Image: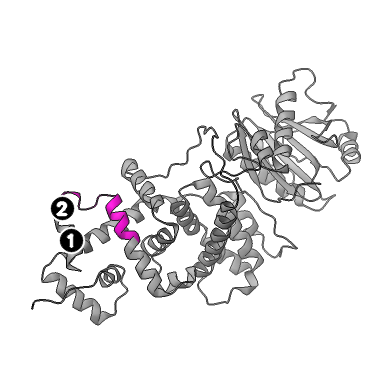
Amino acid sequence: MASRRQAVAAEIPRLRRYARALLGDNWEADDLIQDTLERALARLAQWREGDSPRKWLFSILHNLHVDGLRRKSRRPPHVGLESVGVDQSAPAADAASGRDLDRALQMLSVEQRRVVLLVGLEGLSYAETAEVLDIPVGTVMSRLARGRERLRTLMDYGGGDRDSRAALRRVK
Amino acid sequence: MTGPRRIADAELHAFVDGELGAEEHAEVEALLAAGGLEQALVAELRDLNDAIRARYAGYLGEPVPPAMALPLSRIGRERPGPVRRLLRPAAGLVLLVASAAGGYLARGFVGQPNGPEAAFVITAMGAHTVYVPEVRHPVEVKADEAHLVRWLTKRVGADVRAPVLTGTGWKLMGGRLLPDQEGHPAAQFMYEDATGRRLTLYIRKETGLDNTSFRFAERDGFGAFYWIDRPLAYALTGRLSRDELETLAVLIYGQLEAPAGAKPPPPPGKAQ
């Protein structure tokens, strides 16, 4: 069990990275990671030796995230809290474009964001992503295409070259 | 119409993501090399993935908060019952939810506590702000009086212990008995460092609190870590950085978790 725990611990930085990018809020992300680790520890015995701890942990994280969103949607949102000097920004060389990317990602649907990040950021295969999210591979692919298309628009990729993009779409 | 076959969008994504088999990959590569608008899309998709990875790469190098890794490092101790949660900073600043009462009580908080926990940590932080500025009577019973802990244990109704923090530069000044928000007895230990900063540990029975997680709240420059270690609930408050408080909270948690009666290890550098 000790080695399993170590394997789980080794995944914490990746889990945090994904959760932060997914949620756009470092505290909320750490909250989710804490829940994930807790559940993982409680179910350590269920993790089949030989299975990738990463996939297993991402699945747990995903399920908890879904549960959390469900609960949240049943409660009224609270607004009006004053924010104080807590630095939540990510270390990024190019802060401005980094924030643009943060914002653009948050404008995707959560379903698209998950797929874009699991594949693009975490480097999971389509099959692994499908397993983590418990959806068919075809759904992974369509969400990926739609999510990336929206991101490209939001990030104004090929900004000076709109005609060619329009042409590209027509060609399909 | 003749010419090279069009490459489907999904195929381009799969190509960029390395999802195609060797043969298909080579085919797409050849089609791309032959020119066409797909080249631009492929470049953009690659840029996009690069940008995402670059944006969040820094997170991988960040140290894992000790409280987060702590439960994982406990070799050979399977956790009984519901697993205790450490370091759960409450929901973020943006999407905050709270019960009406919690929301009202917790105005001005960062890492907004809610529900019964809100009342707990707010009372603890209130006790901190009331007693910490006291010059002559910061504590009711001084640390050197042997009955301090015995007395508080008796009154609070559970095994209250005063953590030893001298190794980190904090000296126990003493403690006091005070009412919690419902009129039940609670204990407060106060610590001071060489620069005169003060720290309080507020302790009461956990009755009515059901969240066992390790949480952080902040208001007016004061931070508090609070958690439950049945049968007691703890709140550590001070005008310290979150990191400093967290380190101390983890230390205290570890000390208090040792079986009752076990002496905490002598703190390093204790000169007496």
Residue pictured at 62% horizontal, 32% vertical: B107
Residue pictured at 20% horizontal, 77% vertical: B26
Mark 2 element type: helix
Q: Mark 1 falls within which chain?
A: B
Mark 1 element type: helix
Residue lying at the far top in this picture: please name it.
B136
Q: Quadrant of the N terminus of chain B?
A: bottom left
Residue B50 in view: no
Q: Position of residue B4 (x, y in %)?
A: 12, 76
Which residue is the site of mark 1?
Answer: B40
Picture quadrant where residue B90 is located: top right
Q: Mark 2 falls within which chain?
A: A
Q: Position of residue B264 (x, y in %)?
A: 77, 46
Horizontal placement of B28 versus B102: left or right?
left
Say if the magenta span includes residue B267. no
Horizontal placement of A119 versus B90: left or right?
left
Q: Position of residue B99 (x, y in %)?
A: 66, 43
Highlighted range, magenta: A147-161
Q: Is residue A49 above or below residue B219?
A: below
Q: Quadrant of the C terminus of chain B?
A: top right
Horizontal placement of B58 versus B154: left or right?
left
Task: Please tell me how crowded label 2 is: few (under 14), some (14-19), or many (20+) other residues with Cα within 10 Å.
Answer: few
Residue pictured at 57% horizontal, 64% vertical: A6
Disc 1 marks which amino acid?
A: Ala
Q: Which mark is residue B203?
A: none
Residue B237 in view: yes
Q: Position of residue A81 (x, y in %)?
A: 55, 35
Disc 2 marks which amino acid?
A: Asp
Q: Quick check: marks 1 and 2 in contact, CB under 8 Å? A: yes
Q: Which mark is residue A161?
A: 2
Same subunit, tags 1 and 2: no
